Amino acid sequence: MSDYLESLFSLNGKTALVTGGGKGIGRMIAESLLQAGARVYISSRSAEDCEAAAAEMAALGDCRAYPYDLSQLNNIEALAGEIEAAGQGLHILVNNSGATWGAPLDEFPEAGWDKVMNLNVKSPFFLIQKLLPLLRAAGTQEDPARVINISSVAATMAGSQSAYSYMASKAAISHLTRGLAVDLAKQHIAVNSIAPGFFPSKMTSHMTTDEGLAFMRSLAPMGRIGEPQDIAGVMLLLCGAAGSFMTGATIPIAGGMDLGAGY
């Protein structure tokens, strides 16, 4: 790689926090940031899983586990305190932790609404709020700090698959991204989101049968499901110097699934 290309995508010296960074898309993101040179902190609810994932990814770089249930505000505050105490600042925040819930419309429970909206919308907002001092300190006009919210193609696709709170939450986080981008631009913090299509993960494990995978491929004009490099490329664009003039965007990573051609 030429020095010029490395300067566009290198994250050497940067510190990143990836929530839900131990599995699925979160782990794909964490590994891509590590390989670009960043120090990466991961957080997830299960201490055992979080610490095991950090130990495995330590082969790629400096990766540390901060296990917290981020559905609780006191845990968000505690995590922010630990990140500050680590003393390495915070240049990149990736709000990836999330939940889904599916049930027929007539039977959809309040618990399924509240759990998903709280973790997918409320928690990212308050984590950004609590980490603002670190993000402000890290950003400059030429190289802003970065917040990446993980949305979904479900934010724009009309097919609900009975995941009503999930589709609403992802539309909310995409729009929240735009509002925060405006408010934080002058504080040298860029806020963007990505909207993945189908990627293998714990959340999508119910669709990984042969029939399920064939169905998901049929929804994407490009005829395949997501792979780690698909996430990695966009994340390095958004987090590196190449993306320093981007804010308020939601980028679909879905092989065209967001275009609705399969419906």
Image (tube, helix red, strand yellow):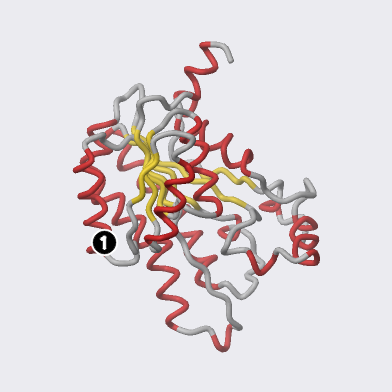
Rendered residue at 53%/83% (across/down): 108
Q: Would residue 190 be seen by someone viewing this image from the given angle?
A: no
Q: Can you say whether 147 is above or below 173 in the image?
A: above
Could you say which is closer to the camera, residue 41 or residue 220? 41
Could you say which is closer to the camera, residue 119 or residue 11? 11
Quarter-wise, where is residue 205 in the image? Answer: bottom right
Q: Quadrant of the N terminus?
A: top right
Q: Would residue 85 be seen by someone viewing this image from the given angle?
A: yes
Rendered residue at 50%/59% (across/down): 171
Q: Is residue 32 left or right of residue 64?
A: right
Rendered residue at 43%/44% (across/down): 148
- Total numbered badges shown on the rendered structure: 1
In the rendered image, the residue lying farthest to the top is 3
Q: Can you say whether 133 is above or below 6 in the image?
A: below
Residue 41 at x, y = what percent? 36, 44
For disc 1, the marked residue is: 75
Residue 76 at x, y = what percent? 27, 58
How crowded pointer 1 is (Cα within 10 Å; few <14, some 14-19, many 20+) is rated as some
Label 1 sits on what residue type? Asn
